[in-house]
Amino acid sequence: MNHASAFLSFDVIRYHVLLSIVKMLSYLPFGLLYVLSDALFFPFYFIIRYRRKTVRKNLTESFPDKSRDEIIRIEKKFYRFFVDMVLETCKLVSISPREMKRHMKFTNAELANDLIHRGKSASLFLGHYGNWEWISSIGLWLSDDAIKAQIYHKLSNRTMDQVMKMLRERAGVACVEMHRTVRFMADAARKGRPCLIGFIADQAPRRKDAKYFIPFLNHDTAVLTGTEKATKHYGYEALFISIKRVKRGYYECGLTPLHDNPGTLPNFELTDLYYQRLEQEIRRCPEMYLWTHNRFRAYRRPR
């Protein structure tokens, strides 16, 4: 066996081991899943201290008006929610469509279905907020007349990437790698079918792509504008997905137009509107945002 074959075989073994663990967790009833989550919180927060410095820095800088005690309360709530969300994501392996629709409810999916029936396409703007992995279940609420997809950033860990792709596609929503977005939208346009594409649009750009900056959570933040450009270029509608956690394991999502006619907006205004809505969501319930990543990189504005 050559080195390439050996690596491939090891990769396959890792995939099946990880998938087996995820499957075992997925078959736990929700009650037991949250007992496990409560048990994992203490070592995760106090011993492993997963990215604690980054989370504390992000929270402190984003909410300068809050005291240290308030920041720590939000921080602990975030880690409790984060562990819940990781375990909830495992449920995507085995949860039935009917049960998924009970746990992740889209309160006005008819707004998107009306666009589909009129032959219109839409970009769905969302962020790393709430259980964004479960938002892929929107496919269960949408008409089969539409092409349904979600844009994702490929993970560096190939095994984890394969497992996450499988989980995200279980509700009938295709996963499209970020660099293939334009080609996918062009192909959808040639097919003449309406298309709904979900964009987790709060990705941090690479340094060379940091061209546009906005005020976001008390930071001068470099943001990507590709979602806006693609939306306007292909004449898509722009819908924002808000998410509310009703109680553990139950969410309600709503669709709201970011603008009645996105194509008429000046450059970057659609991006501004998206980040304004996302910040409103975060300030309403800050523990549901993903604070573990370094979104507020100290890039310099281009001259």
Image (cartoon, rainbow, N blue to C red):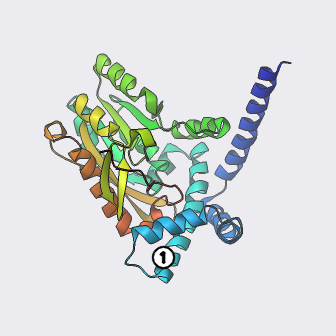
| Residue at 48% across, 31% down | 177
Of residue 251 and residue 123, the one placed in the foreground of this image is 123
In which image quadrant can residue 215 be found?
bottom left
Amino acid type of the residue tagged 1 in the rendering: Ile
Of residue 33 and residue 59, the one placed in the foreground of this image is 59
Q: How many marks?
A: 1
The quarter of the picture where the C terminus appears is: top left
| Residue at 55% across, 57% down | 85
Q: Secondary structure at mark 1?
A: helix
Q: Which residue is mark 1?
A: 71
Q: Position of residue 9 (x, y in %)?
A: 78, 27
Q: Position of residue 178 (x, y in %)?
A: 45, 33
From the viewer's perspective, tell me whether residue 287 is left or right of residue 187.
right
In which image quadrant can residue 130 be found?
bottom left
| Residue at 21% across, 46% down | 269
From the viewer's perspective, tell me whether residue 96 is left or right of residue 117.
right
Q: Is residue 247 visible?
A: no
| Residue at 64% across, 64% down | 37
Q: Is residue 7 visible?
A: yes
